[in-house]
Image (cartoon, rainbow, N blue to C red):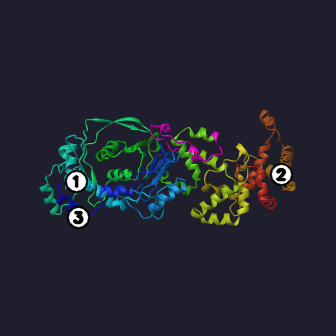
Amino acid sequence: MTPEIINLIFPNPLPTPSEIEAKYPPRQLPEGAKVTRVAPSPTGFMHIGGIYAGLLSERIAHQSGGKFYLRIEDTDQKRKVDGAVELISNSLGRYGIHADEGVDKNGHDFGSYGPYTQSQRKDIYQAYVKDFLEKGLAYPCFCAAEDLDIMRKIQEKTSVRPGYYGKYAKCRNLTDEQILENLKAGKPFVIRFKSNGDNNKRMMIKDLIKGDLALPENDIDIVIMKSDGLPTYHFAHLIDDHLMGTTHVTRGDEWVSSVPLHIQLFASRGWKAPKYAHFAPLQKSDNGNKRKLSKRHDPEANIMYFWEKGYPENALIEYLLNLINASFEDWRRNNPDKNAFDFPVNFNKISNAAGALFDFVKLNSISKDVVAAMSAEQVFEAVLKWAKEYNPAFATRLEDNRDYVTKILNIERNIGKKSRKDLTKWEDVESDIAYFFDDLFQPNPALLSPISATDVRAIADEFMAAYHDTDDKDTWFAHIKSIAERHGFATDMKVHKENPSAFKGNVSDVAKVLRVLTTGRDKTPDLYQIMQILGVDRIKRRLSAW
């Protein structure tokens, strides 16, 4: 291709590839160290799968003594949303997925291999596109959208594989004179890669998760530079991963079919391609069938869903590590006090089967374990932080009653394996503790059925007459048992079970009366501790009110 053509395509000065390479020297890292990246698009939506991919990439890099960086892939400017970069940075940071290099929440670079935002690397990409043209690896394509549409319809009608290749690559063999004529006429164009692949041949690829794959060579002359001068994803990926020294690319398996193209692009420059690891996307059960978790249909696809619900960050991380490798659960059992990030993540232990099913039952179970291991003070601070963002009125209540609420949260806490596990997420706390506040307490006498009103009144009166908040738990329970015995309730559960007709019920029914009258609920944590916190005056008011 003549210099005149190239100068018409790129009239402004550009750096040479050698000048660019000098600014991106090879990384000096220990042997075996991996360099990975997470590269989301700033579309204003952070998919839970992006956190999954980021976590996997970060662990692979840092456990090897390598580097993990954040790159913003914004070459599709039409999809860019204001504030999206801040969302991406905050999302990763919130879950402890810290990049060594990349873009911070304000869009500022940190690290020596930037810019890390693709739209700021336009001259770099164009320098390499120019070099591709000079080396005969690319050509300008003047096909209009209408031309491509007609081509697609012909291919569909004749049952031919779709794409711009072979005889369908109409601009591939334009003469220099034809190209010059089109350029001088101001005809819009893109730049296409000139593929030397043969789709009838297979290439063997070693995927670090899926294993050996035999995929057809790429013969599509893909667009590498769009009409706006920005590169396509495929070309930007080539240049950035080379210059930034990426050694391992971890991404969803929807990109498997692109691997032959990417390897071909690297080979065309004589560069070493990174190793690829493709994981199956997170799935959801839908009417008995599995499907990909969708940002259009599934609220849990959006990472902000978990913020709004108040799932503890480390609960979600532990759940995702469990999806990455099922042995995490055994590791956690054997290492209850270790940080989840100490769990060794390896590509060869990641399932290459269909995508993991996102299971809220499992997530909730893990979240309960995580909350149970926290101190009351830690839970309080986490709930307060959440409430300030999502429930300001509740945040005010918490701040006005710090000591009281901390005592409430400390019920049945820090007692080993028997620590309470009824709290799942911060959104639930307000309703869980509502009965401790008189303005939120809701009596529910219907829960007392079938115990007679006469027995309810007698139990309440007798308990109230002799209750002292200085009583220890044994004395407190002995008082309840004596009331049960006086009113025909069995004090021994086994005796009641053997001869139920001989009693009105058992001692647990008597306790239930007190529980319902003081909390409005028939299931609560330890009633003795609840009464200690409610206090004598409040308990007597509630028992009398019945």
Lower position in the chain sequence, tag 3 or tag 2: 3
Vertical position of residue 403 compared to residue 291: above or below? below
Residue on which the image places disc 2: 458
For mark 3, give the secondary structure.
loop
Locate the N terminus and report the quarter of the image it occupies: bottom left
Q: Relative to the observer, which residue lies in front, 403 or 63?
A: 63
Q: Residues within 10 Å of mark 1 (few under 14, many from 20)?
A: some
The answer to which quarter of the image holds residue 127 is bottom left
Q: Relative to the observer, which residue lies in front, 67 or 423?
A: 67
Q: Which mark is residue 134?
A: 1
Labels 3 & 2 near each other (Cβ < 8 A) = no
Residue at image position (71%, 46%) is 419
Q: What percent of the width, then of the height, locates residue 71? A: 42, 56
Residue on which the image places disc 3: 11
> What is the tally of numbered marks visible in this picture?
3
Asked whether the viewer can see residue 367, the reply is: yes
Q: Relative to the observer, which residue lies in front, 101 or 155?
A: 101
**Kind of residue indicated by mark 3:** Pro
Q: Magenta stretch: dominant SS?
A: loop
For mark 2, give the secondary structure.
helix
Labels 1 & 3 near each other (Cβ < 8 A) = no
Please identify, in this view, whether the residue under mark 2 or under mark 1 is nearer the observer. 1
**Kind of residue indicated by mark 2:** Ala
Q: CA distance from mark 1 to mark 3?
A: 15 Å
In the image, which residues are magenta? 333-362
Asked whether the viewer can see residue 304, the reply is: no
Left or right placement of residue 54 versus residue 461 in this view: left
